Amino acid sequence: MDRRTFVKASLAGVGSILLPNLSYAKSNTSLGHVVIVGGGFGGATAAKYLRMWSNGRVTVTVIEPRSKFISCPVSNRILSGEADLQTITHAYTPLQDNYGIRFINGVVDKIDPDKKRVQIGTEFISYDRLIVATGIDFDYGTIPMINAEIQATSIPHAWKAGAQTILLRDQLSVMPDGGVVAITVPMVPYRCPPGPYERACQIAYYLKQHKPKSKLIVLDANPAITSKRQLFERAWHDFYRDIIDYQPSSTIENVDVKTLTLASTFGRYKVDVLNIIPPQTAGRLALDTGLGNGTKHWCDVNFLDYQSKNIPDIHVLGDSVSSIPPKSAHVATSQAKVCANAIIAELAGEPVDQEPVFANTCYSFVDGKQAVHVANVYRYNHKDQDMQAASGGGISARHSTDEGLQADVWAQSIWADALT
């Protein structure tokens, strides 16, 4: 099986795969140095497959602020007590030991596209190709009373798993029975479309078990649930009809940070726990470098190799990309494989695959054990030059414990695929 055949097969899913020998040349000559900014799902996967598929001929350096990988998928279950931070935290050591990837624990201050180097403090690192996989940033323009410091200390977004996830969990724990929780959902696009609704399920499940007199208000700026609508509506009706108050088309107009009082399009609410998920943009480094597409605040790429349409030799992966497929972990890993395959081909003077195809599967837990899923297939459309939904995929008939078990397997598989 050659590299192109294998990349198509592997992109169909994230299961543990016995990898074939993908060496396409006898030469041990270096193909170049790829620097990857960001060690999330997209960055980590790209690093692994660049090393593996090039037979070690591509040198890879990953620059990541966190010393360990913390998974956003599964993190909502921490709020219900069904998971903990240790469950979703993984070391980068296997990538270093198994593939010879260099990791730098730090923050990139600046990218210099002309000199093809990145700056970390006083250190400069040169690249032949650069991959920017820095995820999302937050846009507080419509909610100026909220900022990063407030979110880190009192009104968490918990949209980047870690300390704020624990903060939100602890706020729920100390809230008195009979208290009110509010979640705000921004307009699409944002990271993980079903994420806020799964979070509502997990918080409502916790309240039902431990604080049954409490209520959860979901203030959604969108006109309706943006993903798995019928499945979430059914779960809320079956399990949480007396707990969840869902209000669509509800935009935040004002927030009193001290009293936790917020005004929306249709009402004013005094709450005990406030989870504001702000509007989102591509990562700040990507935008500051000039990779953004103007007022939309996302990054346009060539979907055959994920190279920026603005700056050559810089590729963008994951949540920062402006695309039809959702901003999900599975999409990020799939993009990473297409990108790795293309970079190796370009550096080796080979043609790039012109027919990329991949799948996206997303599971959401609706209580402690039951889950639902949606799956889609995306193929490259030559006319429109983007990835578009194709035949295949599907959606759950209803929530079930079997799907919950499958969700656990999916999580273990995607972690293994990206990190080991």
Image: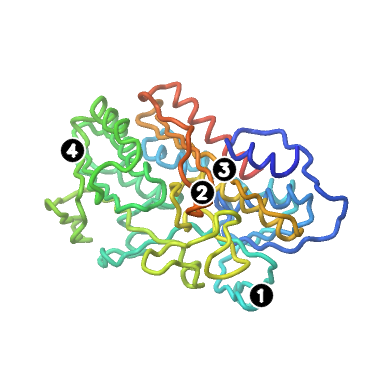
- Residue depicted at x 38% and y 61%: 138
Q: Which residue is mark 2?
A: 381
Image location of residue 120, percent across then percent down: 60, 72
User: What amino acid type is highlighted by mark number 3?
Assistant: Val
Image location of residue 139, percent across then percent down: 35, 64
Answer with left or right where residue 241 lies relative to residue 7: left
**Foreground residue, 339 or 417?**
339
- Disc 2 to disc 1: CB gap under 8 Å: no
For discs 1 and 3, the disc positioned in front in the rendered view: 3
Answer with left or right where residue 274 lies relative to residue 343: left
Element on which disc 1 rests: strand
Q: Gap between marks 1 and 3, in whole Å?
A: 36 Å
Q: Which residue is mark 3?
A: 357
Count neighbours of disc 1 (C-alpha within 10 A) and say few if under 14, some if 14 to 19, many if 20 or more.
Answer: some
Q: Gap between marks 1 and 4, in whole Å?
A: 55 Å
Q: Which residue is mark 4?
A: 178
Q: Quick one: label 2 or label 1, which is nearer the N terminus?
A: 1
Q: Which residue is mark 1?
A: 124
